[in-house]
Amino acid sequence: MLSLRGASAALLIALAVPAAAQTQKYPSKPIRLIVPISPGGGLDYIARAVSQKLTDNLGQSIVVDNRGGASGTIAAEAAMQAAPDGYTLLMTSVSLVTRPLLYKVPYDLGRDFAPITQLSTQSYLLLMTNALPIKTVPELLAHARANPGKMNYASVGNGSQIHLMTELFRTLTKIQVVHVPYKGAINAYPDLISGSVQFMFNSVTAGQPHVKAQRLRALAVSGPKRVSTFPDLPTVSEAGVKGFSVTQWYGLLAPAGTPRDTVEFLSQQINNTLKQPDIVARIAAEGSEAVGSTPQQLAAHIKAERDKWAKVIKEAGIKGE
């Protein structure tokens, strides 16, 4: 039988073990970063750029796990089912915000995830076919109004960000144009170049080579300010469409229930990473701008985006297919 002193010592040891485990410094093992697209593309590029730098800063590997399909739903479901311990993170974009507005999905961003930080933002180019002699947004609107229902615009699919933003453009300008969805921008470009469709919004990165090669004409940028790669291009708002401001953005989430101090730690570490000149340059090379935000700011941004696109979907009568 243990003596009273021996029993007390054994009890102290037993209590100390879980306490030590709880206070073990985070992170103590590799972190999985789920990316909701296949390798390649802007979201994957930003994820890998940040994760490589963060690996050096944290002393633990950030393992990128690409889970493409269903507009991010597969990745979101995998992330929300993971343990809320800070060792599984999810890259997100506006697609994960708008998807539930059009389709039944198993996740709720507000309920199932904890925001960490906004990583980047990028404008779109308003691209015009050379088959028409249109060089400005006012000229595009004048032509559309003179030819109601005869102009086509391309998107990368029903309910996509490009579809929704063009419908916002259409409702603000009150023009009648026809939506032509494609399975991807690579499929839309030949028709845009030939003039089968007349205009399209697409990312600065994807549209820039076509503009530089003079295969297409850029009329404006979609965001709230001009971009360094096209400093002479006005914003759509500057060109006369007041209230229009749309960007592609990427953020980072953790499963709901992740400890608050872990979320705050990650936010601070990633925001510091986003300020480093080499990361700023890498993100700029992709056509984006590094952001960095608090968890609260990202939560507010997601809510504002949800409200904005829910209104567009309702007013334009967009349905999921």
Image (cartoon, rainbow, N blue to C red):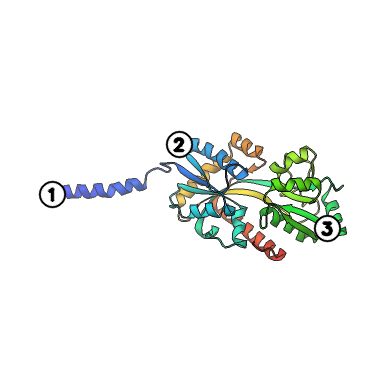
Residue at 43% x, 42% y is 27
Q: Between 292 and 31, which is closer to the camera in this rendering?
A: 31
Give residue 190's quadrant in the image: top right
Which badge, 3 or 1, is on the more N-terminal residue? 1
Judge left or right: residue 148 versus residue 278. Answer: right
Label 2 secondary element: loop
Which badge, 2 or 1, is on the more N-terminal residue? 1
Q: Is residue 185 visible?
A: yes
**Image location of residue 44, percent across then percent down:** 58, 43
Q: Between 183 and 162, which is closer to the camera in this rendering?
A: 183
Label 2 vs label 1: CA separation? 45 Å
Q: Amino acid at mark 3?
A: Lys
Q: Is residue 219 visible?
A: no
State whether residue 176 is above or below residue 2.
below
Residue holding disc 3? 150
* Residue 59: mark in rendering: 2
Choose mark 3 or mark 1, whichever is in front.
3
Label 3 vs label 1: CA separation? 93 Å
Choose mark 3 or mark 2, whichever is in front.
3
